[in-house]
Amino acid sequence: MRKNGFRLGIYVFKDAEVIDYAALYGVFSVARRLNPELDVFLVADSLRPVQTQAGLTVVPNYSFAEEPDLDAFLNPWGIRYASRSA
């Protein structure tokens, strides 16, 4: 079922730099004040917690296997990390 509003998925992967995904997430979260239908969430290779640089562990909202409904997908490090395994 399609959800209303603009849906943005941000890729989070092992050893990602925190600033590369958290800053983007923060910017879009603030934008939600102007457009409450904006939805931003983390997508990873699986639903397991992901340990990023400096040991910070995050839990993604979706895995690729779930095929989340989204309008845009941000990969903070471009194509070279798009196929990394968890």
Image: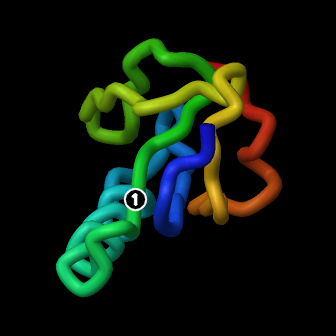
User: Secondary structure under badge 1?
Assistant: strand
Across and down, in percent, residue 70 comes to 62, 53
Q: What's the amino acid at mark 1?
A: Asp
Question: How many numbered marks have been drawn onto this rendered protein structure?
Answer: 1
Please name the residue shown 61% across and 62% down the image.
74
Please name the residue shown 31% across and 80% down the image.
35
**Residue 1 located left or right of residue 40:** right
**Crowding near the residue tagged with mark 1, few <14, some 14–19, many ≥20 C-alpha atoms within 10 Å:** some
Q: Residue furthest top?
A: 48
**Residue 47 located left or right of residue 40:** right
Please name the residue shown 49% across and 59% down the image.
4
In the picture of the structure, the residue carrying the numbered disc 1 is 39
Q: Which quarter of the rendered picture does the C terminus lie within?
A: top right
Q: Quadrant of residue 83?
A: top right
**Residue 44 located left or right of residue 33:** right
Across and down, in percent, residue 16 comes to 48, 45
Front residue of 26/14: it is 26
Which color scheme is applied? rainbow
Relative to 15, residue 75 above or below: below
Across and down, in percent, residue 26 comes to 26, 67
Please name the residue shown 34% across and 26% down the image.
59
